[in-house]
Image: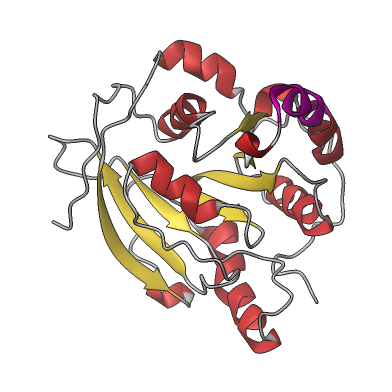
């Protein structure tokens, strides 16, 4: 099956100017503990003309099907805004969610949940349609400030993961790699897996965040990276709420 995203067919050295170290950001922003946010569904888009008008800084969530993307988003906001399923490939649109802190009249940022790539059972006509709106979003979206590229830490990166890294570098997009499912391996296995993963993806150790939606490993570091990209300096308070208003 042809990849959902165009391949840049080029390799870069680690640490481009668009990458930044989350660990250093965590020291800057302090212990976030539990970021209190309000969420609001905006729209689902299956074509560039359906994208909402650019506004608040956008954070894109990308990854192969069944990498835990929806669980990660729900864990971050503390509510089930992204639908989870035992059947991969269910997300077939870009789903936009406004995220703001209580007391703020406008959203601090927008989460963009992109379709999972690499699902072999997805009809070819569907995956071809995905490329028609996913690629333009990643290429041209002016409000997109950070791409979170999710990979499964329990297995080696797949060819589509490597192609996505090259493609994001080629488009000069700021990105961080999120190594999901960190709770499924031991701490020793995780420590051994991360350097290998960094080498395979050609990134620095400071540019990858191990994450678990269950144990909340990496929660603080990931929120720190999101807030830094969106230029949100004030830390949130304890607790999470969801609203449709």
In this view, the residue in front, 226 or 178, is 178
Q: Is residue 164 above or below residue 197?
A: below
> For residue 14, which quarter of the picture?
top right
At 32% across and 30% down in the image, what residue appears? Answer: 35
Quarter that holds the C terminus: bottom left
Would you say 22 lies left or right of 42 here? right
Q: How is the image coloured?
A: secondary structure
At 28% across and 61% down in the image, what residue appears? Answer: 41
Q: Main secondary structure of the magenta part?
A: helix
**Residue 235 locus on image (x, y percent):** 30, 22
Q: How many marks?
A: 0
Q: Is residue 92 above or below residue 198?
A: below
Task: Based on the picture, tell me whether residue 194 belongs to the magenta stretch.
Answer: yes
At 72% across and 40% down in the image, what residue appears? Answer: 153
**Residue 61 locus on image (x, y percent):** 53, 51
Q: Is residue 100 above or below residue 132?
A: above
> For residue 24, which quarter of the picture?
top right
Q: Mark yes or no: residue 165 visible.
A: yes
At 80% across and 77% down in the image, what residue appears? Answer: 1
Would you say 73 lies left or right of 80 here? right
> For residue 50, which quarter of the picture?
bottom left
**Residue 215 locus on image (x, y percent):** 50, 32
**Residue 197 locus on image (x, y percent):** 80, 35
Task: Based on the picture, tell me whether residue 96 belongs to the magenta stretch.
Answer: no
Q: Mark yes or no: residue 144 visible.
A: no
Would you say 7 lies left or right of 17 here? right
| Magenta span | 186-195
In this view, the residue in front, 214 or 197, is 214
In this view, the residue in front, 92 or 217, is 217
């Amino acid at each position: 099956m042809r990849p959902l995203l165009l391949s840049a067919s080029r390799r870069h050295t680690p640490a481009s100017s668009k990458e930044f170290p989350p660990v250093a950001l965590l020291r800057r922003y302090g212990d976030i503990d539990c970021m209190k946010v309000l969420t609001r569904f905006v729209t689902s888009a299956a074509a560039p003309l359906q994208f909402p008008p650019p506004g608040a800084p956008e954070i894109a969530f990308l990854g192969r099907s069944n990498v835990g993307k929806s669980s990660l988003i729900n864990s971050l906001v503390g509510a089930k805004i992204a639908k989870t399923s035992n059947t991969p490939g269910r997300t077939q649109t870009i789903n936009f969610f406004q995220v703001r802190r209580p007391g703020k009249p406008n959203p601090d940022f927008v989460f963009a949940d992109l379709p999972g790539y690499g699902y072999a059972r997805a009809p070819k006509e569907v995956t071809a349609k995905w490329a028609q709106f996913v690629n333009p979003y990643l290429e041209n979206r002016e409000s997109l400030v950070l791409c979170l590229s999710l990979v499964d830490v329990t297995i080696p990166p797949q060819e589509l993961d490597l192609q996505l890294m090259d493609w994001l570098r080629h488009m000069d997009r700021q990105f961080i790699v999120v190594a999901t499912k960190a709770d499924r391996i031991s701490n020793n296995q995780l420590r051994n897996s991360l350097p290998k993963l960094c080498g395979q993806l050609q990134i620095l150790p400071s540019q990858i965040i191990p994450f678990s939606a269950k144990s909340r490993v990496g929660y603080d570091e990931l929120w720190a990276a999101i807030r830094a990209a969106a230029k949100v300096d004030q830390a949130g308070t304890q607790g999470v709420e969801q609203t449709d208003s």
